[in-house]
Image (tube, rainbow, N blue to C red):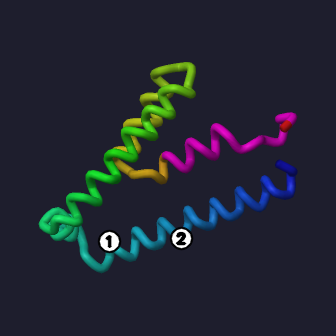
């Protein structure tokens, strides 16, 4: 990956992250804290929640496999189940995007 491609990728992911946070804030503003009860009351809400949890387990397995220090792996995995896959995206960026000092 060239330096230019890496910069574009970082910008795109950063922009997507900001848009995601705006979407979360807007959704919370419109339904408030009780909106999650409505999600759990619907069968598809339960399926969606199970899907997200399964994704968290799978991503946790990937992180646990790739991180050499298991306490560090745990510090990445636990927040996935609270904050969602935004944490997964950050881990992927930190772990796999080249930095200025790398020779990739």
Look at the numbered disc 2 and give the secondary structure of its residue: helix
Would you place residue 27 above or below residue 82 in this image?
below
- What is the x, y in percent for residue 39? 20, 67
Would you place residue 29 above or below residue 77 in this image?
below
- Residue occupying the far top of the picture: 69
* Residue under the image location 76 percent in, 42 percent down: 98
Q: Is 42 left or right of 12, judged from the image as shown?
A: left
The quadrant holding residue 11 is: bottom right
Which residue bears the numbered disc 1? 28
| Total tally of numbered discs in the picture | 2
Q: Which mark is residue 19?
A: 2
Q: Is 54 left or right of 23, judged from the image as shown?
A: left
Residue 89 part of the magenta segment: yes
- What is the x, y in percent for residue 9? 72, 58
**Disc nearer the start of the sequence (2/1):** 2
* Residue under the image location 27 percent in, 56 percent down: 49
- Residue occupying the far left of the picture: 41
Look at the numbered disc 1 and give the secondary structure of its residue: helix
Q: Which residues are magenta?
A: 88-103
* Residue under the image location 34 percent in, 52 percent down: 52
């Amino acid at each position: 990956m060239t330096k230019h491609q890496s910069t574009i990728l970082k910008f795109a992911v950063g922009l997507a992250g900001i848009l995601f946070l705006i979407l979360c804030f807007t959704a919370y503003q419109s339904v408030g804290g009780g909106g999650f009860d409505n999600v759990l009351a619907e069968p598809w809400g339960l399926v969606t929640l199970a899907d997200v949890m399964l994704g968290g387990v799978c991503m946790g397995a990937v992180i646990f496999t790739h991180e050499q220090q298991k306490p560090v792996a745990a510090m990445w995995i636990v927040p996935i189940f609270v904050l969602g896959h935004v944490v997964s995206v950050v881990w992927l960026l930190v772990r796999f995007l080249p930095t200025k000092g790398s020779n990739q």
